[in-house]
Image: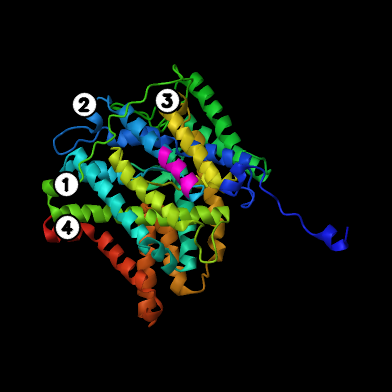
Amino acid sequence: MSQTAVERPSTPQPSSGVDRFFKITERGSSVSREIRGGVVTFFTMAYIVVLNPLILGFAKDVNGDFLGGGSGDGSNLSAIAAGTALVAGLLTIFMGLFANYPLALATGLGLNAFVALAIASQMTWADAMGLVVLEGILILILVLTGFRTAVFHAVPTQLKVAISVGIGLFIALIGFVDAGFVRRTATGPVPVQLGTDGFINGWPTFVFVLGLVLVVILWVRKVKGAILIAIVATTILAIIVEAIGKIGPMVAGDKVNPTGWNLVVPGMPKDIISTPQLDTVGHFSLFGSFERVGIVAAILLIFTLMLADFFDTMGTMTAIGAEAGLLDEEGLPPNTTKILVVDSIAAAAGGAAGVSSNTSYVESASGVGEGARTGLASVVTGALFLLSMVFAPLVEIIPSEAAVPALVLVGFLMMQQVKEIDWNDLEIAIPAFLTIVLMPFTYSITAGIGAGFVAYVLIKAVRGKAASVHPLMWLIAFLFVLYFAIDPIKTLLGV
């Protein structure tokens, strides 16, 4: 054998058809890492199966009716939960198989509250969900015509980095808030504080702190499966704490327990399986809203939904790609168009299933932190969502306090990208700063992106560099100005 042949480096070869299909080896991952990543993403997202019914299930439409035929006593919650898990499962699997990207989807938080409180109150539930379907269809058209992808290309690379960093801080804040570590103040000069009175209060928050300590220790020790191990171990601890202390939920009817569990009370389930109800599926009227509130009002509502969905996904998929090391030189992930197609279909599918618009979830970053790099992780997450329709009692034993330490760790990992921003260049530094800080401060990815885009265009213009700004950036900045001014515009138009 020649010396050249001996020194030739060996290239890892796919070990199976699954490996080749998902490009697992090519992306430097393994099947076990993908499975772990998919499981972790599910655990950090599973709360939506419980939370979405609580947001949608007790809101009344214009006729005083409840979604899914409920009567205000919680009888419709299981149907909304089943519909939520169904759409999340199917679309997340579709994301994995079609786009081969480690990104999971489910009902969008914020959007679901907007649908329940601001839209359904003006029309019937079927009309409101019809608006969501229309919004998803319109976004899909923008993807297929290339407009949505073109917007990605028009955004400066360092602003994309700022979006990723901002999302990192945002999901870390979500973790702290969901665990009760950071809370709103009832009175006083500051809006938030540590615990309920400036101190860590209650065993659930203490369980979160122990979970965070554990995941950090495992991570810095480079233990494989660190995030998954921490979630399982902290859940077991939570079950033990609840069994001994009988703490109960934070809110139970009219009773409020500030030191209780935020959403799910951990404990061994009485049943292993339950029969899913799909009463909300197909509960939508495509154009009923136009007759109910008028064409102008309906269009403004669709515009509001579209802009939030459009840019939430842009930020999320960029942040996930950056954390996974999958972005190209332009800051775009592989199969960008396919990712956006799935996300657009998910928006419409959520409305068609009566559970509000579905969108990409930043919690997917927790699975990426565990090693996920391909769509196999999404397939695993989606399968677990489908299983949760039947095995809901098992899903409901995992409290958010046990799952969200992963979000804090991932927030740190995403924050590390901040060094790629040139903080000496005011034309990018100020927009990047606004993008980063406003996401957690406003609890909105869209608000952060919008402020950054508007500031970027404005600064370029006042420094005499308007011609260097991509035309699409001007258009998007103008649309964001409309978005931020939507209430005054509605008042002006009398709608």
Query: Is the C-beta separation of discs 4 and 3 under 8 Å?
Result: no
Measure the alpha-carbon separation of dots 4 and 2.
32 Å
Furthest residue toward top: 270
Of the residues shown, which amino acid type is indicated by label 3?
Answer: Val
Work out whether residue 423 or residue 24 is closer to the camera in this orientation and state it. Answer: 24
Measure the alpha-carbon separation of dots 4 and 3.
44 Å
Query: Is residue 91 rendered magenta in the image?
Result: yes
Q: Residue at x 41, y 54 (%)?
A: 340
Any mark on residue 289, and which? Answer: 1
Q: Quadrant of the N terminus?
A: bottom right
Q: Label 2: few (<14), some or many (≥20) within 10 Å?
A: some
Magenta part of the chain: 90-98
Work out whether residue 282 or residue 210 is closer to the camera in this orientation and state it. Answer: 282
Q: Which residue is mark 4?
A: 490
Of the residues shown, which amino acid type is indicated by label 4?
Answer: Lys
Q: Residue at x 55, y 26 (%)?
A: 236
